[in-house]
Image (tube, rainbow, N blue to C red):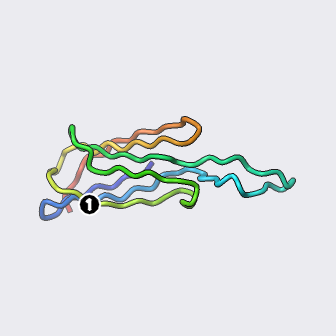
Amino acid sequence: MKIKAVVQNNVVSVKMLIPHPMETGRRKDQSGALVPEHFITEVTATCGADTVFHAELGPGVSKDPYLSFQFTGAKVGDKLKVSWVDNKGGTETAEEAITAM
């Protein structure tokens, strides 16, 4: 997972790219069999003890989703922790320090 968190004028802008196949369960492979569904269901970002972003995703989101959001109340050096969960129980967590613009 790639995360970039930058603060400017007390507003933190976050951009993230999540590598994931995001299969809908409707696509067929070369032999004509359906590819099983496999997609991210939740993404959560926390800074300190506060949840600053939460999204519930589904099969309609494209492969390798790109998400961005903004929040206030953090400073340079604070840690942003991003986690996701998929419909098969897979998870990933990444942490990034907030930098100055």
Residue 93, image x and y in percent?
A: 41, 39
Decide which of 1, 27 is in the foreground and name it: 27
Q: Is residue 86 above or below residue 14?
A: above
- Identify the residue at horizontal 40%, vertical 42% (top origin): 83
Residue sitting farthest toward the top: 89
Classed neighbour count for the residue bearing mark 1: other residues with Cα under 10 Å, few (<14), some (14–19), many (≥20): some
Q: Is residue 39 left or right of residue 29?
A: left
- Residue under label 1, please give it: 70
- Residue 8 falls in which quadrant of the image? bottom left
Q: Quadrant of residue 84?
A: top left
Q: Is residue 9 or residue 58 the one in the foreground?
A: 58
As drawn, the residue found furthest toward the right would be 31
Is residue 97 rendered to the left or right of residue 54?
A: left
Instruction: Measuring from the top left, give residue 62's x and y in whole percent.
Output: 56, 61
Q: Residue at x 41, y 59 (%)?
A: 67
For label 1, the SS is strand
* Amino acid type of the residue that numbered disc 1 sits on in the rendered structure: Gln
Classify the position of the C terminus by image quarter.
bottom left
- Total numbered circles: 1
State the image coordinates of residue 57 (x, y, percent, origin top left).
48, 53
Residue at the (18%, 61%) spot, across then down: 11
Give the residue drawn at x 58%, y 55%: 59
- List x then y, in percent, for residue 42: 45, 46
